[in-house]
Image (cartoon, rainbow, N blue to C red):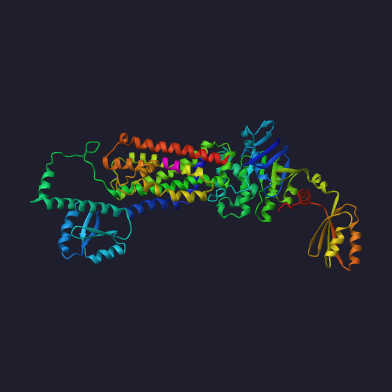
Amino acid sequence: MLETINLSKSFKGKKVVQDLNFYLNDGESVGLLGPNGAGKSTTISMISTLIKPTSGKIILNGVDAVHKPGEIRSVSGVVPQELALYQELSAYENLKFFGSIYKLKGTELEKAIQQALEFVGLEDRKKDLVKIYSGGMKRRLNIAAALLHRPKILILDEPTVGIDPQSRNHILEAVRALNQQEGTTILYTSHYMEEVEQLCDRLYIMDHGKVIAAGTKEELLSILSTEDKIKVELSRIDEDIVQQVETIEGVRKIEVAELQLRIIAAKGSNLISKLVHLTEQHHIQLINFHTESPSLEDVFLHLTGRKLRD
Amino acid sequence: MKSVLWAQFLKDKRNPLLILLFIAGSIVATLILGGGVQSVTTVAIFSEEANASEIEEKWGALLNTNDSFKFEIVDPEEAREDVRDGSSDVAVNLSEDDYRLLVSKRMPGVSYVEQHVASVFQQEVQISAVESQEDGNVRDEMEEYLADAPFQLESQGVDGEQIPKFNIRTQLLFAFTFLISMFIIGFKVNNVTQDRVSGIWDRMILSPVKKTGMYSGYLLYSFLITMLQIVVVLIMFKYVMDYDVGNNLWLIILISACFTFGMISIAMLITGFVRTPEQFYAIYPSLIPLIPLVSGAYMMPGTITNPVLLFIADLFPNAHAMEAIMSVVFYGAGLQEVTMSLLYMLLIGIVAMGVGINLVERRSS
């Protein structure tokens, strides 16, 4: 349905997005994951035709969207990161305005407003001014404004930034319902790994303007399938025991946090028994230990050496 | 375009206080700074010389030749107290051949008083100089001669009727109305930048609304709301406060419309140079009060003679609008006589609008 080929964007000579190859199938839910400044918003702006790429192509159903932006604009709805709403107007008035710019009129417009308000759960507060809304309600209205013309593709740029967990869940549920019940194709950017994990069928992980990994969640997690992540809690920790743990065969990385050791080691390195033996030698009590499944956060850490929210 | 226009109107409908304050501001500024309803301004005169009463009577008679002022002899202490506490703007301390103005603040009316007093004293100095060299009653001879001078200048309005007298208060009415309207224009045109920053502009770009329609919506609304302010203020002064704004209100409104278009374009030009609404608010209000000042809108016509200032004034619609309106109000000029001024304003508007929109578009791409 939508494809980008070697998409790049530079601002004043600085490459913000480099050779991005990306595709989005009909009815799919795809996530664009990356830390702040990874180039996600610029990618979204290019795909939605708000800014022109420096080079590369955006193809929608075989049509070059860079030169014919009308095609993609007519089928997509964009939820910007910022709250693009008139704060001085009510939710209803805002939606009436955004519906009317999409040439919706009369009963068709009223119906679209009603459906959008119901969808984001704001029908009871439609007459209230946006400026008195909570952050979460504003975010929900921000989404509703992009749904009025019933877009086939919904592009959401970090729609849950700065809101409470309850509103976040509401938004995630709404997006999931759009995808699963209405068949809307979703392109969702976030730097919250758990949101993308929860919502998306496929993921693209971006860093420094490049896609560093792509695939389904399972495919991405398999990058770490050769490693175990173990947390060990001890009665005390000294430098000596840390050094000795580091020398155990298979240990790749070790982090110390108060009385806890976080160890990444090669699978099958028989780490637990060696740790038990070592603590006995040092007369240290092993209070607790458990192994963890790797997360997308770990995948990002593995690929970039940084955490997503660094 | 209609949707954009409607949204702008709804915002002001929700919060009409700003527009109402601006309309009230134009009226109050004209009344306070222009010296109230078209009444004669009373100016206190006094002398502290030994022959004070003689000096006061002599100069009182000579000064009271302008219908706009009434020079009243008062006690020196009372005059000083009035100026000090602000109940009068100016008082004149007279001496035999000289005067001093007592001023607490530089109000626009003060310079008008100053000009009148200076011209009376200058004329008297010239007559005294001639009298000192000639015998006989030179003053009477001069008056007789002037009454039947060999060359007589007769002034007529362009329609052949008598020229109405120039009135600074009427000029100030338009000057302040235009000043306030420039602020309204700024606030409204800045909505373009505000909506660009908030992301609403991007939403419109992605919609089927054309760029022309978007700009037209914002600019037409700025135009309509500014014209509302100007027309309300003019009607108020003409019909409620009985100001003499001439008999051709439609032509004045047409001139105001061209001025508004020109100033909207200047605001759009400034919009092209800024990135945020805050930057616009920092630049525009600092620049705008200078335009009427340079254009001489608060001064008697012809006060500004510096060619550089005159050139700068010509670059803005204010000078052309004031010139055209003064011609219509005081000299009964018609559409034909003010066409050049209208064309200048339209030209300024077209050039500034073109450059401004171009800069905005370049910035966004």
Question: Can you give x and y, in whole percent of width and height, for residue A13 in the image?
Answer: 63, 41
| Quadrant including the N terminus of chain A | top right
Question: Can you give x and y, in whole percent of width and height, for residue B148 in the image?
Answer: 11, 42
Q: Is residue A13 magenta?
A: no
Residue A102 figure quarter: top right
Q: How many labels were placed on the picture? A: 0
**Which residue reaches farthest front?**
B133
Q: Is residue B93 rendered to the left or right of residue A179?
A: left
**Residue B287 or B206: which is nearer the viewer?**
B287
**Can residue B164 be seen here?**
yes
**Can residue B13 be seen here?**
no
Q: Is residue B264 magenta?
A: yes
Give the main secondary structure of the magenta stretch.
helix
Q: Is residue A72 rendered to the left or right of residue A218?
A: left
Q: Residue at x 30, y 64 (%)?
A: B84
Q: Is residue A12 rendered to the left or right of residue B100?
A: right
Q: Is residue B336 above or below residue A244?
A: above
Question: Can you give x and y, in whole percent of width and height, for residue A160 in the image?
Answer: 66, 51
Q: Is residue A92 above or below residue A237?
A: above
Q: Which residues are magenta?
A: B261-266
Q: Residue at x 65, y 34 (%)?
A: A65
**Which residue reaches farthest top?**
A62
Q: Residue at x 26, y 40 (%)?
A: B331
**Residue B165 or B90: which is nearer the viewer?**
B90
Question: Can you give x and y, in whole percent of width and height, for residue A125 in the image?
Answer: 59, 52
Q: Is residue A273 rendered to the left or right of residue A97?
A: right
**Residue B62 or A21: which is nearer the viewer?**
B62
